[in-house]
Amino acid sequence: MRSTNQTPGAKVIPFQGEFYQTNPPEPEPQKPLTSLLLIAAVTLLGAGAALGATAAYNSPDQVELRELKAQSAQLNQVKDNLCK
């Protein structure tokens, strides 16, 4: 026969033939899809604005305008130097 050591004050409860399962943990609610779509839309809008600004800055008209301004500044500097 098997003998077990019991701690003082411990009770032995006889098995009744039933197991009680604990309830499974409830899954976390998923974030709504709208927040994900909003973040994607803002990101795409920012990327589009950056690409648009780059395209406008590098457009042939803007490049020519910057070159003309630089030439004008050089001409004013030459004029100032000659008129002194």
Image (cartoon, rainbow, N blue to C red):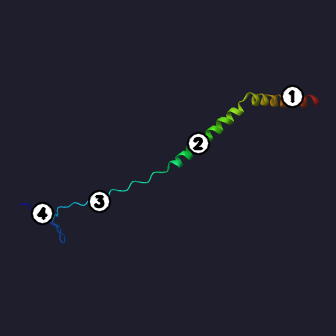
What percent of the width, then of the height, locates residue 5? Answer: 14, 65
Cα distance in 3D space between marks 3 and 4: 29 Å
Residue at numbered disc 4: 4
Q: Secondary structure at mark 4?
A: loop
Nearer-N-terminus badge (3/1): 3
Nearer-N-terminus badge (4/2): 4
At 58% from the left and 43% from the top, the residue drawn is 41
Which of the two marks, 3 or 4, is nearer to us in this view?
Answer: 3
What percent of the width, then of the height, locates residue 43? Answer: 58, 42
What percent of the width, then of the height, locates residue 45? Answer: 62, 41
Residue at numbered disc 2: 43
At 35% from the left and 56% from the top, the residue drawn is 25
Picture quadrant where residue 28 is located = bottom left
Q: Secondary structure at mark 3?
A: loop
Cα distance in 3D space between marks 1 and 2: 44 Å
Which disc, if any, is residue 22? Answer: 3
Nearer-N-terminus badge (3/4): 4
Which of the two marks, 1 or 2, is nearer to us in this view?
Answer: 2
Q: For this rendering, which residue is in front, 70 or 53?
A: 53
* Label 1: few (<14), some (14–19) or many (≥20) C-alpha neighbours in 10 Å: few
At 90% from the left and 29% from the top, the residue drawn is 79
Which of the two marks, 3 or 1, is nearer to us in this view?
Answer: 3
Give the residue type that dot 1 points to. Leu
Q: Secondary structure at mark 2?
A: helix
At 68% from the left and 34% from the top, the residue drawn is 54
Cα distance in 3D space between marks 4 and 2: 67 Å
Give the residue type that dot 3 points to. Thr
Nearer-N-terminus badge (4/1): 4
Q: Are the residues tagged 3 and 4 within 8 Å (C-beta)?
A: no
Residue at numbered disc 1: 75
- State which quarter of the image contains the N terminus: bottom left
